[in-house]
Image (spheres, helix red, strand yellow):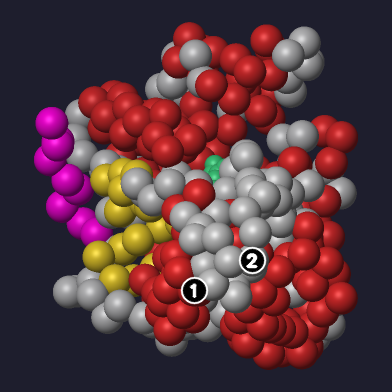
Amino acid sequence: MNQPQPAHTTHTAGRTRVLTGAKPTADLHVGNYFGAIRPAVEASHDTNKEVILMCVDWHGLTDKAKMLEPGKQTSGLLATYLTMGFSLEKNMCIVQSEIPQILEIAWYLSCVSAVGLLERAHAFKDAVANGKEPTAGLFNYPILMAADIVTFDAQVVPVGKDQAQHLEYASDMVRYFNNAVGHPVLFEPKPQIQETPLLIGTDGERKMSKSYGNHLPLFAPKKEIEKRCKEIKTDSKGLDDPKDPESCAVFQILKSFGSEDSVVYMEERLRKGTGYGYGHAKKDLFDEHERVFGSKREQYEHYLNSPREVAQLLTPCHERARHVAATVRQRVRDALGLGIL
Ligand code: ADP
Ligand code: TRP
């Protein structure tokens, strides 16, 4: 049941504050576009929403073997969102490590969270089950994520199914905290679990993921994209056989980013079969990829190689975000009766 919300908010009148986090990782692919990038870009153009898109570089540090990755990959993530049209006008695209208040609030949340709760977190349990030696960073991952959310009074948090437990934890922590101080200080976020199925990879078997190497990248060189399209596994139906689009990975991948026209075109031809083989479908997929992403390759590379320009573009977002974070931090400190200055 929803509990009472704080009397003071940082919300913008008439707009729902939506917060989403993206880890800076290498090689963003069509699966990421379909599941995370496109929904955030679309939401940023919805005038009823105020979107905070956070590049969660601190979360990326929880794997000790890859500690230098977040620092390297952040520019690629930001360049991708900017290139694909995330609107900065009334939204915020920010980098987590630029907002120190998040860590302070994470501390307060850690002081109301039981160790047992964190021990039951899927990611932590998996690490232990796989014989890894989890760091305290990984253990505390759910606290940091809850802090991302409450530091910005987020109302709605869209995530994939794999993140549902983290959002339950965030709600739990809000309740523990509000109970501990005796009145509502933090907003309880509403999870928005995406029901869209995961996009299939080029192997036609597993979900598209860079860890399986079955991904179709967004901005790789043209030759590589072409090669990846040609590699997509299909069944052995011949040129003139009718084919089932639903079980065809080429078609499924096209559907995740292609225009309606391109989707209808391929669907009709596959079903009919005559004179339209998988080779044709792969060529059409490649052409559509070039139209949607290839045409923006230069823009992407420009952002990637212009860190000053990107920093300048994102400075106003960070200023607004810091203002919100400072207001919430003060509200929390007041509730705890902390501080002397
Ligand atoms: P990868 O599996 O390639 O490492 P990540 O786990 O870094 O990808 O994914 C980042 C986000 O991209 C996920 O939270 C999810 O929203 C989205 N995503 C990743 N793979 C897919 C997929 N195959 N289909 C739909 N969305 C995906
Ligand atoms: N844990 C999320 C993931 O792996 C990323 C994340 C961090 C996040 N902080 C967040 C998502 C806040 C939504 C809101 O995908």
* Region rendered in magenta: 1-9
Judge from the rendering whether residue 38 lies leftward or rightward of residue 65; answer left or right: left
Mark 1 within 8 Å of ligand 1, using the beta carbon: no
Return the mark for residue 239. Answer: 2
Q: Position of residue 17 (x, y in %)?
A: 31, 63
Gap between marks 2 and 1 measured at Cα:
11 Å
Find out whether residue 5 is within the magenta segment. yes
101, above or below 180, in the image: below
133, above or below 106, in the image: above
Please tell me whether mark 1 sits on a helix, a strand or a loop: helix
Q: Which one is nearer the viewer's eye here, 222 or 329?
A: 222
Amino acid at dot 2: Leu
Return the mark for residue 269. Answer: 1
* Lower position in the chain sequence, tag 2 or tag 1: 2
Q: Residue at x 28, y 54 (%)?
A: 155
Q: Which one is nearer the viewer's eye here, 242 or 115?
A: 242
- Count of number-bearing discs: 2
Q: Residue at x 25, y 65 (%)?
A: 16
Q: Which one is nearer the viewer's eye here, 323 or 15?
A: 15
Q: Nearer the viewer, mark 2 or mark 1?
A: 2
Amino acid at dot 1: Arg
